[in-house]
Image (cartoon, rainbow, N blue to C red):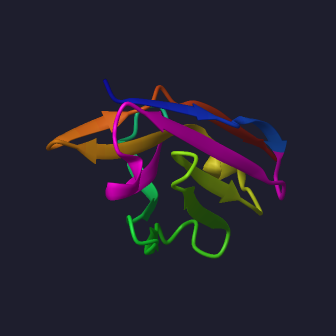
Amino acid sequence: QVQLVESGGGLVQAGGSLRLSCVVSGSIFSTVTMAWFRQTPGKQRELVAAITKSGGTDYADSVKGRFTISRDNAKNTVYLQMNSLKPEDTAVYYCNGAWYGMDYWGKGTLVTVSS
């Protein structure tokens, strides 16, 4: 059974930083693209950043230059380093990966950025 567990969310002031982590168990982590999404009440879940199995990255325009996604295949972990946080970054952040043709999600971690 594939499981994704996020951690690292919390309350931070605007301009601050947080690092999110997502640990994957139950499948071969190194073979898939991993991604971070975020969602606020009443809005669709949106892609924040993705990283391929070979380390290629992609970012939403709104976070380019501020967020960095990375992965440690030895630890089955994907990270999201978030710098220069803004109040509009406030959301629940979800880790995502796809195995066997199915999307898997963590339960999310809440990031709140105060102005």
Picture coordinates of residue 75, whole percent (x, y): 58, 46
- In the image, 114 versus 37, the foreground residue is 37
> Does the magenta-highlighted stretch encompass residue 1?
no
Q: Is residue 72 left or right of residue 34?
A: right
Which quarter shows the N terminus? top left
Residue 69 in the image: x percent, y percent? Answer: 57, 62
Q: Residue at x 39, y 43 (%)?
A: 96
The magenta segment is 13-39
- On the question of residue 39 being in view, the answer is no
Quick one: 104 or 13, which is closer to the camera? 104
Q: Residue furthest left?
A: 101
Return the x and y of residue 46 as percentages of the image width and height.
40, 50
Residue at 34% from the left image edge and 38% from the top image edge: 27
Q: Eyeballing the image, is 84 above or below 37?
A: below
Instruction: Indicate the quadrant where residue 58 lies.
Output: bottom left
Point 38% across, 64% down: residue: 53
Would you say 79 lies left or right of 2 here?
Answer: right
Q: Position of residue 78 (x, y in %)?
A: 54, 51
